[in-house]
Image (tube, rainbow, N blue to C red):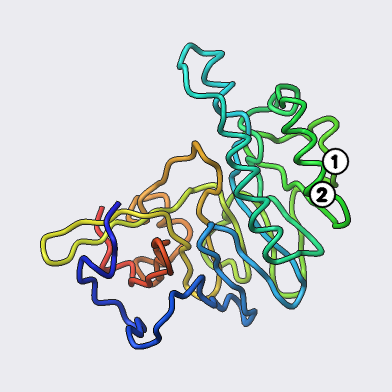
Amino acid sequence: MMDVRAAGWGVAGDDASAGRAVAGAVLVVAGVELVADLSGALWWPERRMLLVADLHLEKGSACAARGSLLPPFDTADTLERLAWVVAYYGPSVVVALGDSFHDTAGTERLAPEDRAHLASLQRGRDWVWIAGNHDPEPGRDVGGAFARVLRFGPLVLRHEPAGLGTVGEIAGHLHPCARVVQRGRSLTRRCFATDGHRLVMPAFGAYTGGLNVRHAAFDTVFDGTGFTAHLIGDNRLYAFPASRCVG
């Protein structure tokens, strides 16, 4: 994996003299300060709320059922990474923004140890599952509450982004990634995409791919290239205007 700093990327706001890695970046959406974490999670300090999108738990078992044999460890890996983030921030509320399970039967395929791990993450805090297009109906015996949309002050939390002009929206669904080229070298990473009015989160799941932010699907979310892609690097996030990103 390319080291961004070693590759000579000139990034606005990159303070090489700081002497330490930056673990995340503060992003402002509809006037609310949020912390974009290197894991792909989003932290709302004021509400002590942790947001994650597109876990796609049990994607490996779903693919295996269709004859594509993938290692069946994606759920365990995703929950382990989520556990690290939960332990770090200690949230009062966790909101999973849809497609938390790869299909409607995913909750039934959870291994006992993964089900127990999930239950331990939910213990002592509120946990909300937002319905996604892969998991539109509430699963059984997975704990937490279920909703289609949540509103907290100026922010609205949902799975699939609404049309242009929506303000205060935090969504997933599109699995944004961005590709930048500089000095003849190319780098593609998951990213947070935001114009300050709304934000699309990267997919958190172990087996999730990415959709380039220059894809036409993002034209229904942002007005042209008037947004910023915050690429997730090894040690920090790197902000590039969408106009600098390539398809």
Compare residues 193 and 84 and report the one nearer the observer: 84
Mark 1 burial class by Cα count in 10 Å: few <14, some 14-19, many 20+: some
**Label 2 is placed on what type of residue?**
Gln
| The quadrant where residue 119 appears | top right
Of callouts 2 and 1, the N-terminal one? 2
Residue at 60%, 49% in the rendered image = 81
For residue 191, above or below residue 105: below
Image point 46% across, 56% down: which residue? 220
Crowding around mark 2 (Cα neighbors within 10 Å: few <14, some 14 to 19, many 20+) is some
- At numbered mark 2, what does the secondary structure look like: helix, strand or loop? helix
Q: Is there CB contact under 8 Å for labels 2 and 1?
A: yes
Q: Position of residue 8 (x, y in %)?
A: 20, 71
Query: Quick one: which residue is furthest to the bottom in this view?
Result: 17
Q: CA gap, disc 2 to disc 1? A: 7 Å
Which numbered marker is on residue 143? 1
Q: Position of residue 240 (x, y in %)?
A: 33, 71
> In screen coordinates, is 191 left or right of 245?
right
* Residue in the picture at 24% in, 71% down: 9
Q: Residue furthest left?
A: 184
Kindly identify which numbered label has been placed on residue 66.
none
Residue 148 position (above or below residue 219): above
Relative to 51, say whether 109 is above or below: above
Q: Secondary structure at mark 1?
A: loop
Callout in the foreground (2, 1): 2
> What residue is pinned by disc 2?
122
* Total residue callouts: 2
Q: Relative to residue 118, is residue 199 drawn left or right?
A: left
Q: Percent position (x, y) of residue 42?
A: 61, 64
**Residue drawn 74% across the image and 78% down it:** 46
Query: Above or below — where is 209 with respect to 213?
Result: above
Residue type indicated by callout 1: Gly
Q: Is residue 122 left or right of 58 when viewed as pictured?
A: right
